[in-house]
Amino acid sequence: MKTKAAIAWKAGQPLTIEEVELAGPREGEVLVEIKATGICHTDYYTLSGADPEGIFPSILGHEGAGVVVDVGPGVKSIKKDDHVIPLYTPECRECKFCLSQKTNLCQAIRSTQGRGLMPDATSRFSIDGKPIFHYMGTSTFSNYIVVPEIALAKIRKDAPFDKVCYIGCGVTTGVGAVLFTAKVEAGANVVVFGLGGIGLNVIQAARMVGADKIIGVDLNPAREAMARKFGMTHFINPSKVENVVDAIVGLTDGGADYSFECIGNVDTMRQSLECCHKGWGQSIIIGVAAAGQEIKTRPFQLVTGRVWKGSAFGGARGRTDVPKIVDWYMEGKLNIDDLITHKLSLDQINVGFDLMKSGESIRSVVEF
Ligand code: NAD
Ligand code: AHE
Ligand code: ZN
């Protein structure tokens, strides 16, 4: 079949909207009509050329929601007309990683996914017989996609696609980092570096669990009002203080219990560790830094009990946890609506990247 999609032909160039040939689902695969997709900073990161796994030409996008159109042979857990969120972190429930119960990083299809291919090492997308690569196993900047069954979370049918698509990455990443990775407890002091599409979700989850001080750090002064609405109690603009770490330590009687880096900058990653409380403070790294970047600190920071941890997709197990997060939104426990600041058509997708770069948008959502 044909599908309309935004193609990333080369790093650093705007996407172009084209008709793409899409081959049907094979064994264990599912054809999904994407109804809406968010634009995440990671799409921009890969498009910029900074991602060592970036492959071109490809169809980016990993924050979608849609409806199942057809299933391939052997598919058991998903049927036509199901509403789904594609998962860039699948959940096979069979691999060593899934069975360990220690991580959400299912590795069943990670190697082909990282090479822009389906599990059988081929692409379903092509133009004039030449393959176009998949991205993060999802490629939600295409109206129709083929994905493995293990990479789909089945969600309730009354959830609006133009809102819950954001649960495909940003909401789950931010909320999950608080609930599943850090397990923040009531009364804890929390610091959030970067008040964008991820950081604001960290803030709303910190409020949800009853955190005490919730300190936001961002260079963009326009982020303060939105972050306060989501639960931030104190705002630090790094350009207005002499030393960000000292400012946080001063506000928190010695340091944060938990800090979350939601920028992707190795200098703020260091600050995120060093602003933590001696003996127990944990710094959770969410931001994705460019190829070649490295983090550093004095090892004494770790010797004296501060902890550096990473979090991918908020530590969420997609097929299990994503339907629950959709329920939380539908029950009014999570605010997604106010974070979706812009709605676009596929033809306007490059505007979405411009709005992100200029700091005007929190999330832009493309509706098909
Ligand atoms: P975003 O562009 O919406 O937000 C980034 C925020 O950081 C902005 O508000 C910006 O003003 C602020 N900022 C930039 N540089 C700063 C600095 N030096 N000091 C203080 N503030 C600064 O991005 P997003 O969609 O929220 O994504 C944030 C990061 O998280 C990205 O690196 C993205 O790739 C990554 N990410 C990781 C995961 C994961 O699973 N680990 C998932 C989604 C996104
Ligand atoms: N390919 C990148 C890594 C990018 C990365 O860390 N991705 C996160 C999700 S970001 C979503 O917006 C992730 O889940 N990582 C775990 C994994 O297996 O990729 C690079 O820098 O190499
Ligand atoms: Zn993302």
Image (cartoon, rainbow, N blue to C red):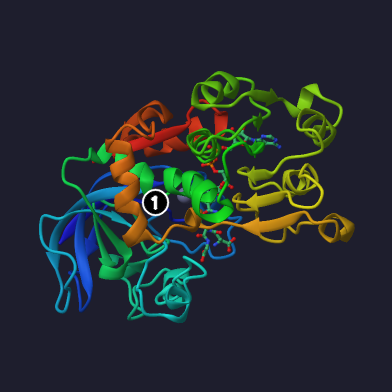
Disc 1 is placed on an element classified as: loop
CA neighbours of label 1 inside 10 A, class few (<14), some (14 to 19), many (20+): many
Q: Looking at the figure, which quarter contains the N terminus?
A: bottom left
Q: Residue at x 34, y 69 (%)?
A: 131
Horizontal side, residue 63 vs residue 244: left or right: left
Spot occupied by residue 79 in the image (x, y as percentages of width and height): 12, 63
Residue at x 33%, y 41% (from the top left corner): 328
**For residue 308, which quarter of the picture?**
bottom right
Could you tell whether 81 is left or right of 314 in the image?
left
- Residue named by callout 1: 61
Q: Image point 56% across, 28% down: which residue?
A: 359
Q: Nearer the viewer, residue 329 or 254?
A: 254
* Ligand 1 placement by image quarter: top right
* Residue 294 in picture, x, y percent from top left: 75, 59
Q: Nearer the viewer, residue 145 or 261?
A: 261
Task: Out of 179 and 366, give the one closest to the viewer.
Answer: 179
